[in-house]
Image (cartoon, helix red, strand yellow):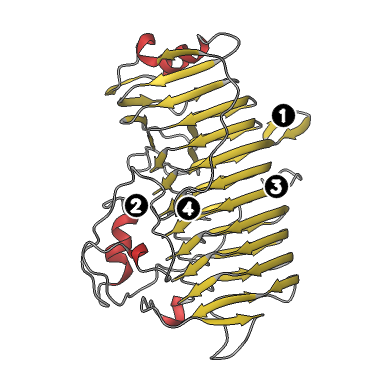
Amino acid sequence: MANFPTGACPQGVTFVKKNVLVHDVREAGMPRRDFLQKSMLAALPAIGVAAGIPRAFGAVMAGNMPAISMSAAAVYDPPVRTRGATTLSVRDWGAAGDGARDDTTSFQAAIDALPSAGGTIHVPAGDYVIDPTRNVRLRSNMHLQLADGAILRAKRNDQERAYVLMVYKVSNVEISGGRIVGDRDNHLGTTGEWGHGIMIRGSSRVTVRDIHVSKCWGDGVSIGGAMVTNAPTIPCDDVVIANIVSTGNRRQGLTIGCASNVKVYDSEFSDTRGIAPQCGIDVEPDSNDGRITSTVHIENCVMRGNAGNGVLLYKRVKGVTVKRCTMEYNGGHGLLTIGPEGGYIAQNTIRHNYLVGLMLGASTYNYQVSGNVFRNNNTRLHGVNTVLNPLVAMAGIVEGNKGNGAHVAKVSTATEIRVTTNQFAK
């Protein structure tokens, strides 16, 4: 993965009253972001300028406060994948769900017992310990359905690579409901960055929806190619991530590697910190594979409080749209591009990021930036200001004190860049 320097957490905030959610301080007419009806609402303590970001957002990042969901009402209905009518319960194969017994074998036995047409594996409420060094391997034509109150808890381990759920070279898979909790708080090793909650490799027609993933040693969710000895890497195709929260993970909220036709809707990727790149979403093909990542659509999502960038688009990436998202309080840029080709960044809210809100970096080609709202970015220089100053419409990249350089910038090797009218405020 690319390794980028990240700024320290932004310091200072004007004032946040108790029981007032930060996302309630929003643009006039902006809908309340309540996409996850079951998300917990955090009551932020009163903080002043001296307390700064670490006391409020730092508490969330440290896991002492729940993440606040911030997507608008869901705009996307994820597809139901093809599968048989059989439904089995992991309890019938001996899963205890008591938070103590290792239930990995029971989960795999239930999955392996599905008929050839596939079906649904139901996980009732309970605390299920899963050994990520063995992982639960999903098969084609199946739905892993977690009930409310079902938690898959990673068994602590010392491995650099370990995955709670593995979706490997299969098709027509759906994962929904419940929670996955990683072992970053009690991991036995000190190296590696690949301890993921959900690992999707070389698979097609996969839907992940309505699930909360947190505290993984690596990524909450990772999508990419399956490497094959003496043969081309098998990319993922047609993967949908919808209505999830991925928070408090160590490397990324979501990685999109070697894949095509990926849709990400109505989700939150927050509070990533521990090992670079530390982004909310990182769209980046593996460095040891010459294939590209293409046709990615990210809409109505929140990238907040990550130690790195809210979104990173890095090399060999084509056809990415980032639309109607919120990128705020990130320790890097709200959105950083390095080397992608052909993209559209529109109707987003980008605010309170430590570095420039949108940085169009080296070799970025053929990008359009339209209809976004930028507020109080580059807080490294300007500090955090939550006062809603009047917005000023501006086209292009305008230098100077009255320009928009804190919000959108490009380097000389970024070409065919079209910045149409956006709105800006200090």
Name the kind of residue labelled 4 in the image: Ile
**Element on which disc 1 rests:** strand
Q: CA distance from mark 4 to mark 2?
A: 20 Å
Please state which of residues 308 and 26 is positioned toward the viewer in this rendering: 26
Residue of label 4: 275
Give the mark, 3 or 1, whose residue is nearer the N terminus: 1
At numbered mark 4, what does the secondary structure look like: helix, strand or loop?
A: loop
Q: Which mark is residue 293?
A: 3
The CA distance from mark 3 to mark 1 is: 18 Å
Q: Earlier in the sequence, mark 4 or mark 1?
A: 1
The residue shown at (64%, 56%) is 321
Q: Amino acid at mark 2?
A: Ala
Q: Amino acid at mark 1?
A: Val
Q: CA distance from mark 4 to mark 3?
A: 23 Å
The residue under label 2 is: 67
Snapshot quadrant of residue 376: bottom left
Q: Secondary structure at mark 3?
A: strand
Viewer-proximal residue among 34 and 110: 34
The residue tagged with tag 2: helix, strand or loop? loop
Going by the numbered disc 3, the residue's amino acid type is: Thr
Lower position in the chain sequence, tag 4 or tag 3: 4
Give the left or right position of residue 85, taking residue 249 as reference. right
| Disc on the earlier residue, 2 or 3 | 2
The mark nearer the N terminus, 1 or 2, is: 2
Q: Which residue is mark 1?
A: 228
Task: Say above or below: 293 vs 324.
Answer: above
Measured Cα–Cα span from mark 1 to mark 2? 38 Å
